Image (cartoon, grey):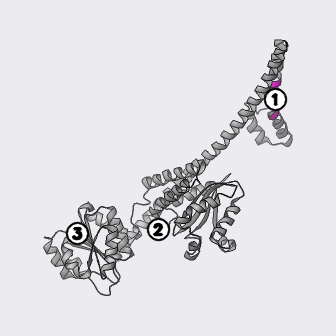
Protein backbone atom coordinates (compact mmCIF):
# COMPACT_ATOMS: atom_id res chain seq x y z
CA UNK A 1 0.00 0.00 0.00
CA UNK A 2 1.22 3.49 -0.88
CA UNK A 3 0.33 6.99 0.24
CA UNK A 4 0.41 9.43 -2.68
CA UNK A 5 -0.18 13.06 -3.65
CA UNK A 6 -0.95 13.72 -7.31
CA UNK A 7 -1.80 17.02 -8.97
CA UNK A 8 -0.91 20.40 -10.46
CA UNK A 9 -0.58 23.86 -8.92
CA UNK A 10 0.25 27.48 -9.69
CA UNK A 11 3.95 26.61 -9.90
CA UNK A 12 3.60 23.87 -12.49
CA UNK A 13 0.56 24.77 -14.61
CA UNK A 14 -1.13 27.75 -16.25
CA UNK A 15 -4.48 29.14 -15.12
CA UNK A 16 -6.07 27.68 -18.28
CA UNK A 17 -4.93 24.15 -17.41
CA UNK A 18 -5.85 24.54 -13.73
CA UNK A 19 -9.34 25.57 -14.80
CA UNK A 20 -9.69 22.42 -16.89
CA UNK A 21 -8.74 20.22 -13.94
CA UNK A 22 -10.80 22.01 -11.28
CA UNK A 23 -13.64 20.19 -9.49
CA UNK A 24 -16.90 22.08 -9.04
CA UNK A 25 -18.15 21.95 -5.42
CA UNK A 26 -21.37 20.20 -6.44
CA UNK A 27 -19.37 17.52 -8.28
CA UNK A 28 -17.16 16.57 -5.34
CA UNK A 29 -19.36 13.79 -3.94
CA UNK A 30 -19.82 12.03 -7.29
CA UNK A 31 -16.11 12.46 -8.10
CA UNK A 32 -15.08 10.66 -4.90
CA UNK A 33 -17.60 7.89 -5.50
CA UNK A 34 -16.47 7.37 -9.10
CA UNK A 35 -12.79 7.32 -8.15
CA UNK A 36 -13.36 4.75 -5.41
CA UNK A 37 -14.68 2.29 -8.01
CA UNK A 38 -10.99 1.86 -8.91
CA UNK A 39 -10.41 -1.35 -6.96
CA UNK A 40 -6.78 -0.72 -5.83
CA UNK A 41 -7.80 2.70 -4.40
CA UNK A 42 -8.79 2.50 -0.72
CA UNK A 43 -9.05 6.14 0.39
CA UNK A 44 -9.15 9.55 -1.31
CA UNK A 45 -9.26 13.29 -0.56
CA UNK A 46 -9.67 15.73 -3.46
CA UNK A 47 -8.40 19.29 -2.97
CA UNK A 48 -9.50 21.82 -5.59
CA UNK A 49 -8.77 25.56 -5.26
CA UNK A 50 -7.97 28.34 -7.73
CA UNK A 51 -4.27 27.58 -7.34
CA UNK A 52 -4.24 23.77 -7.25
CA UNK A 53 -6.01 20.50 -7.91
CA UNK A 54 -4.56 17.64 -5.88
CA UNK A 55 -5.58 14.09 -5.07
CA UNK A 56 -4.34 12.52 -1.84
CA UNK A 57 -4.90 8.82 -1.44
CA UNK A 58 -4.05 5.37 -0.16
CA UNK A 59 -3.64 2.87 -3.00
CA UNK A 60 -2.06 -0.48 -3.70
CA UNK A 61 1.52 0.04 -4.83
CA UNK A 62 2.03 0.54 -8.55
CA UNK A 63 -1.57 1.50 -9.38
CA UNK A 64 -1.29 5.30 -9.28
CA UNK A 65 -1.53 5.43 -13.08
CA UNK A 66 -5.10 4.07 -12.90
CA UNK A 67 -6.15 7.06 -10.81
CA UNK A 68 -4.46 9.43 -13.26
CA UNK A 69 -6.40 7.79 -16.10
CA UNK A 70 -9.62 8.35 -14.16
CA UNK A 71 -8.74 12.01 -13.48
CA UNK A 72 -8.19 12.67 -17.19
CA UNK A 73 -11.40 10.87 -18.15
CA UNK A 74 -13.42 12.77 -15.53
CA UNK A 75 -12.27 16.13 -16.91
CA UNK A 76 -12.10 15.04 -20.57
CA UNK A 77 -8.45 15.99 -20.85
CA UNK A 78 -5.69 14.21 -22.76
CA UNK A 79 -3.17 12.61 -20.39
CA UNK A 80 -0.33 13.67 -22.69
CA UNK A 81 -1.43 17.30 -22.27
CA UNK A 82 -1.48 17.01 -18.50
CA UNK A 83 1.61 14.91 -17.77
CA UNK A 84 4.34 17.58 -18.28
CA UNK A 85 2.73 19.71 -15.56
CA UNK A 86 1.87 16.90 -13.15
CA UNK A 87 3.66 15.88 -9.96
CA UNK A 88 3.29 12.62 -8.07
CA UNK A 89 4.72 12.20 -4.56
CA UNK A 90 4.71 8.94 -2.62
CA UNK A 91 5.03 7.94 1.02
CA UNK A 92 7.17 10.40 3.02
CA UNK A 93 7.31 12.90 0.12
CA UNK A 94 3.51 12.85 -0.12
CA UNK A 95 3.16 13.39 3.63
CA UNK A 96 5.65 16.28 3.57
CA UNK A 97 3.87 17.85 0.58
CA UNK A 98 0.48 17.80 2.30
CA UNK A 99 1.98 19.39 5.43
CA UNK A 100 3.75 22.06 3.35
CA UNK A 101 0.54 22.89 1.46
CA UNK A 102 -1.54 23.06 4.65
CA UNK A 103 1.05 25.29 6.35
CA UNK A 104 1.14 27.81 3.50
CA UNK A 105 4.71 26.88 2.52
CA UNK A 106 3.60 25.94 -1.00
CA UNK A 107 1.22 28.88 -1.53
CA UNK A 108 1.41 31.72 -4.03
CA UNK A 109 1.83 34.03 -1.03
CA UNK A 110 4.21 32.35 1.39
CA UNK A 111 2.57 31.60 4.72
CA UNK A 112 -1.00 32.57 3.77
CA UNK A 113 -3.48 30.99 6.20
CA UNK A 114 -6.54 30.48 3.95
CA UNK A 115 -5.27 27.22 2.44
CA UNK A 116 -5.53 25.37 5.77
CA UNK A 117 -9.26 26.07 5.88
CA UNK A 118 -9.60 24.85 2.29
CA UNK A 119 -7.74 21.62 3.11
CA UNK A 120 -9.95 21.06 6.16
CA UNK A 121 -13.04 21.61 4.02
CA UNK A 122 -11.83 19.11 1.40
CA UNK A 123 -11.10 16.54 4.11
CA UNK A 124 -14.57 17.11 5.58
CA UNK A 125 -16.27 16.51 2.23
CA UNK A 126 -14.28 13.31 1.70
CA UNK A 127 -15.28 12.02 5.13
CA UNK A 128 -18.94 12.79 4.49
CA UNK A 129 -18.97 10.72 1.29
CA UNK A 130 -17.17 7.80 2.95
CA UNK A 131 -13.85 8.18 1.14
CA UNK A 132 -11.67 8.53 4.26
CA UNK A 133 -10.74 5.71 6.61
CA UNK A 134 -7.98 4.95 9.10
CA UNK A 135 -4.85 5.96 7.18
CA UNK A 136 -5.98 9.25 5.60
CA UNK A 137 -7.94 10.20 8.69
CA UNK A 138 -4.78 9.84 10.76
CA UNK A 139 -2.71 11.64 8.10
CA UNK A 140 -4.97 14.69 7.87
CA UNK A 141 -5.41 14.99 11.63
CA UNK A 142 -1.61 14.76 11.95
CA UNK A 143 -1.24 17.43 9.24
CA UNK A 144 -3.62 19.85 10.95
CA UNK A 145 -1.68 19.47 14.21
CA UNK A 146 1.64 20.13 12.43
CA UNK A 147 0.23 23.18 10.61
CA UNK A 148 -0.84 24.56 13.99
CA UNK A 149 2.62 23.81 15.40
CA UNK A 150 4.29 25.66 12.52
CA UNK A 151 2.02 28.68 13.04
CA UNK A 152 2.74 28.79 16.76
CA UNK A 153 6.46 27.99 16.71
CA UNK A 154 7.57 30.05 13.69
CA UNK A 155 6.80 33.52 12.29
CA UNK A 156 5.62 32.15 8.95
CA UNK A 157 2.30 34.00 9.21
CA UNK A 158 3.21 36.78 11.59
CA UNK A 159 4.00 39.50 9.08
CA UNK A 160 1.77 41.21 6.50
CA UNK A 161 2.63 40.42 2.87
CA UNK A 162 -0.39 41.90 1.05
CA UNK A 163 -1.05 45.62 0.68
CA UNK A 164 -4.51 45.31 2.28
CA UNK A 165 -3.27 43.27 5.21
CA UNK A 166 -0.28 45.58 5.67
CA UNK A 167 -2.66 48.55 5.84
CA UNK A 168 -4.74 46.87 8.55
CA UNK A 169 -1.63 45.79 10.42
CA UNK A 170 -0.38 49.38 10.35
CA UNK A 171 -3.72 50.46 11.83
CA UNK A 172 -3.25 48.02 14.69
CA UNK A 173 0.11 49.59 15.50
CA UNK A 174 -1.39 53.07 15.80
CA UNK A 175 -4.72 52.11 17.40
CA UNK A 176 -4.07 49.29 19.83
CA UNK A 177 -7.76 48.33 19.89
CA UNK A 178 -9.38 48.45 16.45
CA UNK A 179 -12.70 47.47 18.03
CA UNK A 180 -13.03 51.12 19.15
CA UNK A 181 -12.32 52.61 15.71
CA UNK A 182 -14.43 53.77 12.78
CA UNK A 183 -13.10 53.22 9.27
CA UNK A 184 -13.75 54.97 5.96
CA UNK A 185 -12.94 52.86 2.90
CA UNK A 186 -12.73 54.75 -0.38
CA UNK A 187 -13.18 52.55 -3.46
CA UNK A 188 -14.82 49.17 -3.89
CA UNK A 189 -12.25 47.11 -5.75
CA UNK A 190 -10.47 43.90 -4.77
CA UNK A 191 -7.92 45.57 -2.46
CA UNK A 192 -10.60 47.48 -0.53
CA UNK A 193 -12.70 44.31 -0.31
CA UNK A 194 -9.74 42.42 1.17
CA UNK A 195 -9.05 45.28 3.59
CA UNK A 196 -12.72 45.21 4.66
CA UNK A 197 -12.46 41.49 5.32
CA UNK A 198 -9.40 41.97 7.55
CA UNK A 199 -11.06 44.88 9.37
CA UNK A 200 -14.18 42.83 10.10
CA UNK A 201 -11.94 40.16 11.60
CA UNK A 202 -10.60 42.90 13.93
CA UNK A 203 -14.18 43.81 14.98
CA UNK A 204 -13.97 47.51 14.06
CA UNK A 205 -16.82 49.58 15.50
CA UNK A 206 -18.15 50.87 12.15
CA UNK A 207 -17.21 50.99 8.47
CA UNK A 208 -18.24 53.37 5.70
CA UNK A 209 -17.64 52.46 2.04
CA UNK A 210 -17.44 55.39 -0.39
CA UNK A 211 -17.47 54.77 -4.12
CA UNK A 212 -18.18 56.64 -7.34
CA UNK A 213 -21.14 54.33 -8.01
CA UNK A 214 -23.35 53.76 -4.99
CA UNK A 215 -24.47 50.34 -6.30
CA UNK A 216 -20.99 48.88 -5.99
CA UNK A 217 -20.55 50.46 -2.55
CA UNK A 218 -23.86 48.96 -1.43
CA UNK A 219 -22.86 45.51 -2.67
CA UNK A 220 -19.65 45.61 -0.64
CA UNK A 221 -21.37 47.15 2.39
CA UNK A 222 -23.99 44.40 2.52
CA UNK A 223 -21.22 41.82 2.58
CA UNK A 224 -19.44 43.36 5.57
CA UNK A 225 -22.17 45.19 7.47
CA UNK A 226 -20.91 48.64 6.46
CA UNK A 227 -22.71 51.85 5.35
CA UNK A 228 -22.52 52.77 1.67
CA UNK A 229 -21.94 56.40 0.66
CA UNK A 230 -20.93 58.29 -2.48
CA UNK A 231 -17.65 60.15 -2.99
CA UNK A 232 -19.62 63.37 -2.56
CA UNK A 233 -20.64 62.28 0.96
CA UNK A 234 -17.03 61.97 2.15
CA UNK A 235 -16.76 65.45 3.78
CA UNK A 236 -19.82 64.62 5.90
CA UNK A 237 -18.43 61.29 7.16
CA UNK A 238 -14.69 62.04 7.23
CA UNK A 239 -14.72 63.58 10.75
CA UNK A 240 -16.03 60.27 12.13
CA UNK A 241 -13.20 58.26 10.62
CA UNK A 242 -10.25 57.20 12.75
CA UNK A 243 -8.83 55.27 9.79
CA UNK A 244 -9.10 56.05 6.07
CA UNK A 245 -8.00 53.50 3.50
CA UNK A 246 -8.28 54.56 -0.13
CA UNK A 247 -7.78 52.64 -3.36
CA UNK A 248 -9.54 53.95 -6.47
CA UNK A 249 -8.64 54.41 -10.10
CA UNK A 250 -9.33 58.16 -10.01
CA UNK A 251 -6.88 60.24 -12.10
CA UNK A 252 -6.84 63.08 -9.52
CA UNK A 253 -6.72 63.12 -5.69
CA UNK A 254 -10.05 62.55 -3.91
CA UNK A 255 -8.96 63.88 -0.52
CA UNK A 256 -7.17 67.21 -0.26
CA UNK A 257 -5.32 68.85 2.60
CA UNK A 258 -8.15 71.27 3.26
CA UNK A 259 -10.81 68.57 3.66
CA UNK A 260 -8.65 66.57 6.08
CA UNK A 261 -7.72 69.71 8.05
CA UNK A 262 -11.41 70.59 8.45
CA UNK A 263 -12.21 67.06 9.58
CA UNK A 264 -9.39 67.11 12.16
CA UNK A 265 -10.73 70.33 13.68
CA UNK A 266 -14.17 68.74 14.04
CA UNK A 267 -12.48 65.72 15.64
CA UNK A 268 -10.83 68.10 18.14
CA UNK A 269 -7.46 66.94 16.81
CA UNK A 270 -7.91 63.25 17.61
CA UNK A 271 -5.39 61.42 15.37
CA UNK A 272 -6.39 60.10 11.97
CA UNK A 273 -4.55 57.39 10.02
CA UNK A 274 -4.78 57.70 6.23
CA UNK A 275 -3.50 54.87 4.03
CA UNK A 276 -3.34 55.69 0.31
CA UNK A 277 -2.99 52.48 -1.66
CA UNK A 278 -3.90 54.06 -5.01
CA UNK A 279 -1.61 54.78 -7.97
CA UNK A 280 -1.96 57.62 -8.91
CA UNK A 281 -2.54 58.88 -5.38
CA UNK A 282 -6.02 59.42 -3.93
CA UNK A 283 -4.80 61.66 -1.07
CA UNK A 284 -2.74 64.81 -1.53
CA UNK A 285 0.80 64.38 -0.17
CA UNK A 286 0.44 67.71 1.72
CA UNK A 287 -1.91 65.95 4.15
CA UNK A 288 1.23 64.53 5.80
CA UNK A 289 2.09 68.09 6.94
CA UNK A 290 -0.93 68.17 9.30
CA UNK A 291 -0.10 67.54 12.96
CA UNK A 292 -2.67 64.86 13.74
CA UNK A 293 -2.75 63.15 10.34
CA UNK A 294 -0.58 60.09 9.71
CA UNK A 295 -0.36 59.48 5.95
CA UNK A 296 1.13 56.33 4.45
CA UNK A 297 1.38 55.59 0.72
CA UNK A 298 1.67 52.36 -1.21
CA UNK A 299 5.46 52.87 -1.32
CA UNK A 300 5.59 52.94 2.48
CA UNK A 301 3.56 49.74 2.64
CA UNK A 302 5.70 48.08 -0.03
CA UNK A 303 8.76 48.59 2.14
CA UNK A 304 6.95 46.92 5.05
CA UNK A 305 5.85 44.05 2.81
CA UNK A 306 9.38 43.43 1.51
CA UNK A 307 10.77 43.32 5.05
CA UNK A 308 7.99 41.00 6.14
CA UNK A 309 8.45 38.67 3.17
CA UNK A 310 12.13 38.39 4.06
CA UNK A 311 11.11 37.52 7.64
CA UNK A 312 8.72 34.87 6.32
CA UNK A 313 11.47 33.38 4.16
CA UNK A 314 13.63 33.00 7.25
CA UNK A 315 10.71 31.48 9.18
CA UNK A 316 10.13 29.04 6.32
CA UNK A 317 13.54 27.48 7.01
CA UNK A 318 12.46 26.65 10.55
CA UNK A 319 9.09 25.45 9.26
CA UNK A 320 10.74 23.07 6.80
CA UNK A 321 12.66 21.43 9.66
CA UNK A 322 9.35 20.76 11.42
CA UNK A 323 7.87 19.37 8.18
CA UNK A 324 10.77 16.92 7.78
CA UNK A 325 10.68 15.72 11.38
CA UNK A 326 6.90 15.31 11.55
CA UNK A 327 6.76 13.56 8.14
CA UNK A 328 9.24 10.97 9.40
CA UNK A 329 7.12 10.63 12.54
CA UNK A 330 4.08 9.71 10.46
CA UNK A 331 6.11 7.26 8.37
CA UNK A 332 7.21 5.58 11.60
CA UNK A 333 3.55 5.19 12.54
CA UNK A 334 2.82 3.61 9.15
CA UNK A 335 5.74 1.23 9.61
CA UNK A 336 4.45 0.29 13.05
CA UNK A 337 1.14 -0.73 11.46
CA UNK A 338 3.02 -3.14 9.22
CA UNK A 339 4.86 -4.63 12.20
CA UNK A 340 1.55 -5.04 14.02
CA UNK A 341 0.22 -7.07 11.08
CA UNK A 342 3.36 -9.23 11.05
CA UNK A 343 3.21 -9.80 14.79
CA UNK A 344 -0.48 -10.71 14.57
CA UNK A 345 0.18 -13.20 11.77
CA UNK A 346 3.19 -14.70 13.57
CA UNK A 347 1.21 -15.13 16.79
CA UNK A 348 -1.75 -16.68 14.96
CA UNK A 349 0.47 -19.20 13.21
CA UNK A 350 2.26 -20.07 16.44
CA UNK A 351 -1.04 -20.53 18.26
CA UNK A 352 -2.34 -22.74 15.45
CA UNK A 353 0.79 -24.89 15.72
CA UNK A 354 0.41 -25.11 19.51
CA UNK A 355 -3.30 -25.98 19.27
CA UNK A 356 -2.62 -28.71 16.72
CA UNK A 357 0.15 -30.31 18.83
CA UNK A 358 -1.93 -30.08 22.03
CA UNK A 359 -4.97 -31.56 20.25
CA UNK A 360 -2.92 -34.52 19.01
CA UNK A 361 -1.43 -35.07 22.48
CA UNK A 362 -4.85 -35.01 24.17
CA UNK A 363 -6.20 -37.50 21.65
CA UNK A 364 -3.36 -39.95 22.45
CA UNK A 365 -3.94 -39.50 26.20
CA UNK A 366 -7.64 -40.30 25.71
CA UNK A 367 -6.61 -43.45 23.85
CA UNK A 368 -4.63 -44.54 26.92
CA UNK A 369 -1.16 -43.44 25.81
CA UNK A 370 1.68 -43.19 28.32
CA UNK A 371 1.51 -39.70 29.86
CA UNK A 372 5.26 -39.11 30.01
CA UNK A 373 5.80 -40.30 26.44
CA UNK A 374 2.94 -38.13 25.14
CA UNK A 375 4.28 -35.01 26.92
CA UNK A 376 7.82 -35.65 25.58
CA UNK A 377 6.47 -36.11 22.05
CA UNK A 378 4.39 -32.89 22.44
CA UNK A 379 7.48 -30.89 23.45
CA UNK A 380 9.55 -32.43 20.63
CA UNK A 381 6.96 -31.75 17.90
CA UNK A 382 6.14 -28.25 19.13
CA UNK A 383 9.83 -27.28 19.24
CA UNK A 384 10.52 -28.67 15.77
CA UNK A 385 7.54 -26.92 14.20
CA UNK A 386 8.34 -23.55 15.85
CA UNK A 387 12.04 -23.57 14.93
CA UNK A 388 11.60 -25.00 11.43
CA UNK A 389 11.27 -21.73 9.47
CA UNK A 390 13.96 -19.79 11.43
CA UNK A 391 16.32 -22.77 10.94
CA UNK A 392 15.69 -22.80 7.19
CA UNK A 393 16.30 -19.03 7.00
CA UNK A 394 19.52 -19.21 9.06
CA UNK A 395 20.87 -21.97 6.84
CA UNK A 396 19.91 -20.15 3.61
CA UNK A 397 21.47 -16.83 4.71
CA UNK A 398 24.69 -18.52 5.81
CA UNK A 399 24.90 -20.44 2.52
CA UNK A 400 24.43 -17.24 0.46
CA UNK A 401 26.85 -15.20 2.61
CA UNK A 402 24.15 -12.72 3.62
CA UNK A 403 25.97 -11.67 6.77
CA UNK A 404 23.90 -8.53 7.53
CA UNK A 405 20.61 -10.42 7.28
CA UNK A 406 22.07 -13.31 9.28
CA UNK A 407 23.13 -11.00 12.11
CA UNK A 408 19.70 -9.32 12.14
CA UNK A 409 17.89 -12.65 12.38
CA UNK A 410 20.28 -13.90 15.07
CA UNK A 411 19.64 -10.73 17.07
CA UNK A 412 15.87 -11.22 16.67
CA UNK A 413 16.16 -14.82 17.93
CA UNK A 414 18.41 -13.82 20.83
CA UNK A 415 21.41 -15.73 19.39
CA UNK A 416 25.07 -14.80 19.59
CA UNK A 417 26.61 -13.74 16.27
CA UNK A 418 30.17 -14.48 17.45
CA UNK A 419 31.86 -17.73 16.47
CA UNK A 420 34.24 -19.50 18.89
Residue indicated by mark 1: 385
Mark pair 2, 1: CA separation: 63 Å
Examine the rendering and report whether any part of residue 303 can be seen. no
10 Å crowding of disc 1: few (<14), some (14-19), many (20+): some
Residue indicated by mark 3: 242
Give the quarter of the figure containing the C terminus: top right
Q: Which residues lie in the magenta part?
A: 381-389
**344 above or below 328?**
above
Which percent across, then down, holds residue 48? Answer: 54, 65
Which percent across, then down, holds residue 110? Answer: 47, 65
Secondary element at tag 2: loop
Q: What residue is rendered at 47% in x and 68% in y?
A: 109
Which percent across, then down, holds residue 101? Answer: 53, 61
Q: Nearer the viewer, residue 249 or 274?
A: 249
Mark pair 2, 3: CA separation: 30 Å
Secondary element at tag 1: helix
Mark pair 3, 1: CA separation: 86 Å
Q: What residue is rendered at 52% in x and 53% in y?
A: 143
Relative to 293, 105 lies left or right:
right
Q: Mark 2 against mark 1, which lies toward the viewer? A: 1
Dot 2 or dot 1, earlier in sequence: 2
10 Å crowding of disc 3: few (<14), some (14-19), many (20+): many
Residue indicated by mark 2: 109
10 Å crowding of disc 2: few (<14), some (14-19), many (20+): few
Residue at the bottom extreme, as displayed:
251
Q: What residue is rendered at 82% in x and 19% in y?
A: 363
Secondary element at tag 3: loop
Amino acid sequence: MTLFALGINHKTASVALREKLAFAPDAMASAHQQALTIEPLHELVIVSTCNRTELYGHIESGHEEQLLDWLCQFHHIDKAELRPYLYIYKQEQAIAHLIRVSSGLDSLVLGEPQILGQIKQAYGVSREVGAVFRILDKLFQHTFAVAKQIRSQTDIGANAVSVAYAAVNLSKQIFSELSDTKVLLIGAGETIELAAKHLVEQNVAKMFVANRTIERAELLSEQFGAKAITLGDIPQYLPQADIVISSTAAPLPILGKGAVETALKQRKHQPMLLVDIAVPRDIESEVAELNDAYLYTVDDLQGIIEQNMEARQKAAVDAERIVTARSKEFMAWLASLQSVNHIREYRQRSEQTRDLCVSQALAKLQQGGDVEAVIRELGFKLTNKLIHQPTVSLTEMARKGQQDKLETLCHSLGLSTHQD
